[in-house]
Structures are given as C-alpha cells and as structure tokens.
Image: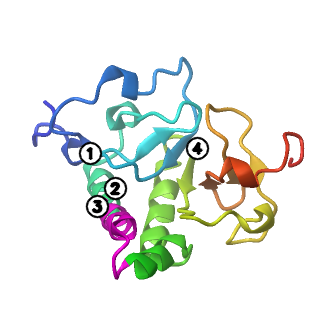
Amino acid sequence: MIGTHASRYWRLEAPEPTPPDEICSCTQPQDLKLQYSLGFNPIHCMVCNLEVRPSVLQFSGVLAEALQKWNTLRGALETLWLDSGEYEAWASSQLVNPGGWVNTLGRQLAKDLRAFRPTYYNLFMGSQSPRDFHCPICEVKMARYADGDLEQLVCLGCWLVMFPDEVCLPPPGGLR
C-alpha cells in the first residue's frame, strides 16, 4: 500500500505510486546516491539517476524515518534558496557547507545506506562549481563517475557526488 502505515517505508513513498519510468530499472544493482529531488524518496541510482525503491534495499523502519527527516530538512532549505527571498543567502550557506547540520546528517545516512549498497552523498552546489574540482572536505581531486547518464564528479574517499555545470567541466580525459 502506497503512503500508508502498512509499509515500513511509507514515509518515503509518494501518495500516488511513482510512475515506472521514474524508477530505476537497471539490470544489475548499481551504486546509489542520497539526493534531494523534490520528491518523497531521496535514494537514487548513480547510473540512471532514477529512484531506487526502498523495499529493494530492505533497510529498517528507523532508517526510513531518518531518511524522511533529512529529505524534509534538505527540501526546506532548497525551498528557501529557490524562493530567492531574504533567506536565500542563509539557505545557500547551509546547503553548500559540508560540515553543516543537513549535510552532516545526510552524509551519515549515506554511510548507513552503504550497509546495503555503495552510496554517495550529493553535496549541493547551488551556483558554485567545485573549486578546481577538488573535494570540499578532503581537498583530493575529484574524478568523473565512469558510468551514468549524467556528468558527475565523485570523491571516492568522502563518498561525495556533485553535478558540476557542463560549462565548467574540463574536456573528457582531463580528469581521472
């Protein structure tokens, strides 16, 4: 049952079923990323960028509740940022700070999800681009994620993924 207490994942399910073309259908289990994307389920496939059903991973209801809380907090900050009102600068400063509360919580949840499948955390970039393509946490040069439908940079040590503007990316083969 979608959106009811009958499933331990009800907090991560939309009131109406997610359309099949928005659900990962990769033939093999792929790496995951935890990212906010205006929906109920923040768990996405690194390759196709579509939602991965929580029931596929079989994690606890406690983790589902924590993921829903993070998704709500991150969504609230992104809403303030998108509103472009008086809270835009503050929200942006919270979203881009890897040591800020929402990112600390998100990185911990991505780590918890790694018990089920390799999971990266999508660090919000806003209008920024990665400084010289180095991780904002450990300063190691980020690499292009080899697979996937989107241009993504990853820090393998910090388990971060970022979506840089295509304009600021060096030519293919420029990183690795």
Segment tinted magenta in the rendering: 72-87
Secondary structure under the numbered disc 3 in the rendered image = helix
Marks 3/1: CA–CA distance: 10 Å
For disc 2, the marked residue is 67
Q: Residue at x 83, y 50 (%)?
A: 170
For disc 3, the marked residue is 72
Query: Quick one: label 2 or label 4, which is nearer the N terminus?
Result: 2
Secondary structure under the numbered disc 2 in the rendered image = helix
Q: Main secondary structure of the magenta part?
A: helix
For disc 1, the marked residue is 12
Specify the label residue 118 is tagged with: 4
Marks 3/4: CA–CA distance: 23 Å
Position of residue 136 relative to residue 54, above or below, is below
Q: Residue furthest right?
A: 174
Q: Do the residues under discs 1 and 2 have CB atoms within 8 angstroms?
A: yes
Give the class, few, some or many, for how many residues have Cα within 10 Å of label 3's Cα (few <14, many ≥20): some
Q: Nearer the viewer, mark 1 or mark 4?
A: 1
- Of 136 and 27, which appears nearest the observer? 136
